[in-house]
Image: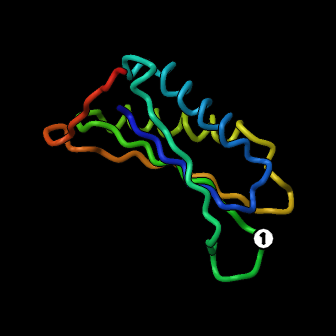
Amino acid sequence: MPHVTMEYTANLPQLDVAKTLLVLNQTLLISGHFGAEMDIKNRAIPLEFFQVGTTAASRGFVHVKLALLSGRSAEVKKVLSESLLTALRDSATWPAEVEVQLSVEVVDLDRESYAKAVIRG
């Protein structure tokens, strides 16, 4: 725990996805709110088909969802979302020809029903 899901529009070829995922994990690790570095998991989902607004303007977005076990305060969640947004903003050189929206949301996972197993081979 935590789980990070990054969705991004396909019109952002300058986005180095592997680097960005690493930066997001590092940001969470240095926050001090999580234990072992191997507990921080993320994935990226490219979106080939998307629409931002109603015009044909060149727009795109990157949205990060941070899923945490329930119980953290609103203040901690705000600090985490702001630090992830800063890391995301600083992770790439964004194209001048595309209006890019960056966003982060934090969601709670029910602590009582969350299950996890680690398999070592």
Q: Quadrant of the N terminus?
A: top left
Which residue corresponds to the image point at 39% horizontal and 17% vertical from the top-left? 36
Q: How many marks can you see?
A: 1
- Relative placement, left or right, of 97 versus 38 is right
Q: Front-most of 78 and 109?
A: 109
What is the residue that sits farthest to the right in this orientation?
96
- Relative placement, left or right, of 48 versus 25 is right
Q: Position of residue 114 (x, y in %)?
A: 21, 40
Q: Position of residue 96 (x, y in %)?
A: 86, 56
Q: Front-most of 94 and 13?
A: 13
Picture quadrant where residue 16 is located: top right
Residue located beneath label 1 in the image:
58
User: Looking at the image, is 101 positioned above or below residue 49?
Assistant: above
Q: Quadrant of the C terminus?
A: top left
Picture quadrant where residue 86 is located: top right
- Relative placement, left or right, of 2 versus 14 is left
Which residue corresponds to the image point at 80% horizontal and 48% vertical from the top-left? 14
Which residue corresponds to the image point at 13% horizontal and 38% vertical from the top-left? 112
- Relative placement, left or right, of 3 versus 112 is right
Q: Residues within 10 Å of mark 1 (few under 14, many from 20)?
A: few
Q: Position of residue 22 (x, y in %)?
A: 60, 30
What is the residue that sits farthest to the left in this orientation?
112
Q: Amino acid at mark 1?
A: Ser
Q: The residue tagged with tag 1: helix, strand or loop? A: loop
Q: How is the image coloured?
A: rainbow
